[in-house]
Amino acid sequence: MMELIYELIAFVLKAGVVVFAVMLIVGIVAQATQRQKVRKGELIVERLTDELRDGVERLRLELMDKKQRKQVEKSLKQKQKQEQKENTKKRVFVIDFKGSVDANEVESLRREVSAIIAVAKPGDTVFLRLESPGGAVDGYGLAAAQLERLREAKLELTVSVDKVAASGGYMMAVVADHIQAAPFAFVGSIGVIAQLPNFHRWLKKHDVDYEQVTAGEYKRTLSVFGENTDEGRRKFKQELEGIHQQFKAHIQRYRPDLDLDKVATGEYWTAQEAIDYGLVDSISTSDAWLMARRDSHDMFLVRYVQKKNLGERVGRQVVATLQTLTNYIRKQQS
């Protein structure tokens, strides 16, 4: 009997290896065929007002007896019909930005902003839930420029920070008409940083020569493999200072009353501290802001979602299958 079980296990493992190999080949082929194709996405719009209301009303109804529940349900239906008929509520478009170091999320942000501008009316509000520790200057500069388009379209922009909006994240936030943040959210870090390793001494120790040819005196100031000079370091620092000055000018444009000598030091603060410096306008969470407007506004969540190509989908499935096989083998060995 035990021999039969062992043979069965061996068969399952062999079959799993074959399946894994086939899926891996399919994944590689699919990835190769789709490499040249542009990934398409989809704009998703959800009526956030109904979702917020439904949760509250469901709880409220559960606390009532049967008779009261029927009366309230009837009243709610009549109220909803009347609201749909009048349609006089202000509109809020909610978007999310959870930024990475390279700010590649700006592509989705660009499409969301374009869609909102196409349908919104002057006076409508855009509510951005922002979370980012900052990153690449060019990426976050472009993200901030996308938010500037909303203000140019005469839309009111409110940024809400529940966790962090530092450096490039604050570069985006400062564009808003109003910035709110949760009490212990981190904001600020108005500074610029660049760092890189240098392997010159290691290469020299192992008798490895490194050649670098440039045209232009400052085409390359600091090098990873070559010998860095004081002149190169000075020029590199000068370039960072230039970016910092542009960063401060951007902040000053939207918050002219800020004391930049105090806040543009690269430091960051909790929202409770930052409000005294004028970096944020109010203390609140995004949930509190939305719940306070669930009855007075029509709110729409706008998301642009990039579709995964076939290679990525197959790749995920391959990883999942491999993990299942690994777990199965471990159980058999234990």
Image (cartoon, helix red, strand yellow):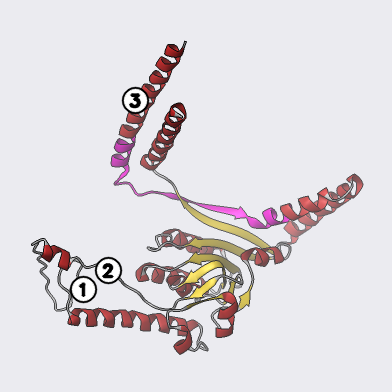
Residue contact at pointers 1 and 3, CB within 8 angstroms: no
Q: CA distance from mark 1 to mark 3?
A: 50 Å
Residue at numbered disc 2? 196
Mark closer to the observer (2, 3): 2
Please say if 154 is above or below 5. below
x and y percentages locating residue 144 in the rendered image: 44, 71
Residue contact at pointers 1 and 2, CB within 8 angstroms: yes
Residue at numbered disc 3? 18
Residue at numbered disc 1? 222
Query: Which element is circle 3 on?
Result: helix
Please say if 243 is above or below 72. below
Say whether disc 1 or disc 2 marks the residue closer to the N-terminus: 2
Quadrant of the rendered image containing residue 244: bottom left
Q: Residue at x 72, y 53 (%)?
A: 55
Quadrant of the rendered image containing residue 234: bottom left
For badge 2, the amino acid type reads Leu
Q: Is residue 6 left or right of residue 24?
A: right
* Label 3 Cα crowd, 10 Å radius (few <14 / some 14-19 / many 20+): few
For badge 1, the amino acid type reads Leu
Q: CA distance from mark 1 to mark 2?
A: 9 Å
Q: How many marks?
A: 3
Instruction: Tell me the magenta residue range.
Output: 27-54
For badge 3, the amino acid type reads Val
x and y percentages locating residue 84 in the rendered image: 73, 57
* Label 1 Cα crowd, 10 Å radius (few <14 / some 14-19 / many 20+): many
x and y percentages locating residue 8 in the rendered image: 43, 16
Residue nearer the viewer, 49 or 218? 218
Q: Is residue 31 left or right of residue 223?
A: right
Quadrant of the rendered image containing residue 30: top left
